[in-house]
Amino acid sequence: MCRNIRQLHNFEPPATSDEVRAAALQYVRKVSGASKPSQVNQQAFDEAVEAVAQATAHLLEHLTTNAPPKDREAEREKALARNAVRFGTPA
């Protein structure tokens, strides 16, 4: 998975539509190999982002789990600690 796409399921508060769209945009960029499409491809790119965002929102709405929701700030702190170990930077 692309490192820029974050897990969106089972967080409190739930993922926002902006987070879903950002994940969709990153996915389409990765698949297309273009961070900014040419003018001739812009419509196809935008349609793909919208379709992926809708599919993602649908998936998130229908997933179920017995696990307690994760805290966004606690997960952020864990990620910073992992990065500090991985890259040798202060947390």
Image: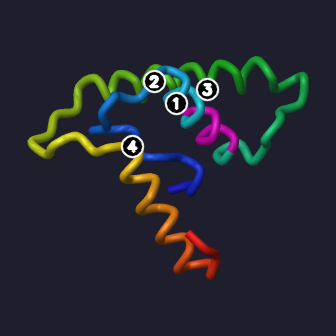
Badge 1 vs badge 4, beta-carbon distance below 8 Å: no
Badge 2 vs badge 1, beta-carbon distance below 8 Å: yes
- What label does residue 36 carry, if any? none
The residue where tag 2 is placed is 16
Query: Does residue 68 appear left or right of residue 36 in this picture?
Result: left
Badge 4 marks a residue whose secondary structure is helix
Amino acid type for the residue under numbered disc 4 = Arg
Amino acid type for the residue under numbered disc 1 = Glu
Q: Position of residue 61 (x, y in %)?
A: 28, 23
Badge 3 marks a residue whose secondary structure is helix
Membership of 11 in magenta stretch: no
Amino acid type for the residue under numbered disc 3 = Val
Q: Earlier in the sequence, mark 3 or mark 4?
A: 3
The residue where tag 4 is placed is 72
The residues bearing labels 2 and 1 have C-alpha atoms spaced at a distance of: 5 Å
Within 10 Å of disc 4 (Cα), the crowding (few <14, some 14-19, many 20+) is some
The residues bearing labels 1 and 3 have C-alpha atoms spaced at a distance of: 12 Å
Residue farthest to the left, as pictured: 66
The residue where tag 3 is placed is 49
